[in-house]
Image (tube, grey):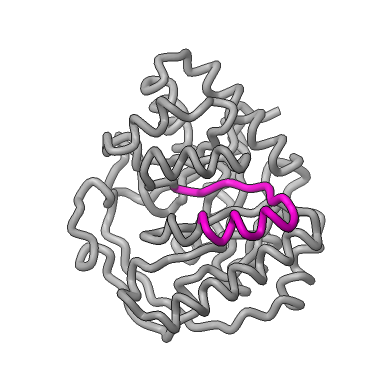
């Protein structure tokens, strides 16, 4: 059984094109299990292909990320993000516009190695006040939720500069049928965290918390039974490797920081967050 579970990684991304197998084996050898998250059809398919190589310990999640709904563009994170504590390494990437095809994603999601739908949600960070794109994101998000309900799978939520809208959409959807899931890389306010927790969702934290104190209060006030740990690799590399490419093995530093903030033992933090992940994702 795993000691830790990285509930949000992207070893299916091109950053690991040359050494994905080695990165994954390094984690497994240290009792760290991995859930690879898709952001488009091709990376979702790749996550499944990777998971199928392993008898256990590597799983997949499929979805179309909201940033890929608008026109394709090149993004340099350092230029648009002046808050230094939010950066662990300079992130450059190009968004690739894709239309969401629910049936194609459903076919992927029916694979037994797929444990959730995600990452899906709302991301207003790069679009300013583009109302058309915001409405498109909400529409596609609802389609993802419908797929998750249809297949009885939990959801991994992505949210950036849109927590109030995300809460509004989830409250509406939850009134129809309860959704299970986790708000990945939570960066909202304590009051927003409390709203997510009241609806039964988990909050995910990653390497950001090892060098940015902004979320200590949220972590202190979130029950350990509702916390998941993640890397979001190759991004948000924790101390002491900040500035380098992240990998699933480094989730141990996130667990250690959770333990430090909550003033509990590392073993307790590891055991409970692993239990949380196994229960939510059925692994």
> Is 62 drawn above or below residue 242 in the view shown?
below
- Which image quadrant: the C terminus? top right
Residue shown at 72% from the left, 35% from the top: 279
Looking at the picture, tell me which residue is in the foreground, 112 or 98: 98
Looking at the picture, tell me which residue is in the foreground, 168 or 260: 168
| Residue 240 image-quadrant placement | top left
Residue shown at 57% from the left, 44% from the top: 7
Tell me where the magenta segment starts and ends, as one range. 167-185
Q: Where is residue 39 in the image (x, y as percent from the top left)?
A: 55, 67
| Residue 161 image-quadrant placement | bottom left
Q: Where is residue 81 in the image (x, y as percent from the top left)?
A: 23, 61
Looking at the picture, tell me which residue is in the foreground, 252 or 146: 146
Residue shown at 41% from the left, 40% from the top: 191
> Is 21 drawn above or below residue 64 in the view shown?
above
Residue shown at 67% from the left, 71% from the top: 143
Q: Where is residue 30 in the image (x, y as percent from the top left)?
A: 57, 31
**Residue 171 part of the magenta-drawn span:** yes
Q: Is residue 135 left or right of residue 147?
A: left
Q: Is residue 75 visible?
A: yes
Q: Is residue 148 left or right of residue 124?
A: right
Q: In this view, does 280 lie to the left or right of 120?
A: right
> Is 11 drawn above or below residue 220 in the view shown?
below
Q: Is residue 60 visible?
A: no
């Amino acid at each position: 059984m795993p000691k830790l579970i990285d509930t949000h990684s992207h070893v299916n991304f091109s950053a690991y094109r040359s050494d994905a197998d080695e990165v994954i084996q390094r984690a497994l050898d240290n009792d760290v299990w991995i859930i690879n998250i898709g952001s488009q059809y091709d990376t979702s398919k790749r996550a499944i292909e990777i998971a199928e190589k392993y008898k256990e310990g590597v799983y997949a999640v499929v979805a179309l990320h909201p940033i890929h709904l608008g026109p394709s563009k090149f993004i340099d994170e350092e230029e648009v993000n002046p808050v230094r504590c939010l950066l662990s390494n300079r992130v450059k990437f190009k968004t690739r516009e894709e239309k969401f095809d629910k049936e194609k994603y459903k076919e992927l999601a029916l694979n037994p190695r797929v444990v959730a739908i995600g990452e899906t949600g709302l991301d207003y960070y790069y679009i300013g006040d583009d109302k058309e794109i915001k409405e498109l994101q909400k529409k596609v998000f609802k389609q993802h939720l419908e797929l998750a309900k249809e297949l009885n799978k939990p959801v991994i939520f992505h949210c950036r500069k849109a927590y109030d809208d995300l809460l509004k959409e989830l409250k509406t959807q939850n009134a129809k049928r309860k959704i299970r899931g986790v708000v990945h890389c939570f960066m909202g306010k304590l009051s927003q965290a409390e709203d997510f927790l009241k609806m039964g969702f988990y909050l995910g934290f990653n390497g950001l918390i090892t060098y940015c104190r902004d979320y200590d209060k949220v972590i202190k006030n979130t029950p350990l039974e509702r916390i998941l740990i993640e890397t979001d690799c190759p991004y948000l590399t924790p101390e002491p490797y900040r500035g380098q490419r992240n990998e699933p093995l480094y989730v141990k530093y996130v667990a250690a920081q959770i333990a430090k903030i909550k003033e509990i033992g590392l073993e307790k933090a590891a055991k409970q967050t692993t239990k949380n992940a196994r229960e939510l994702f059925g692994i």
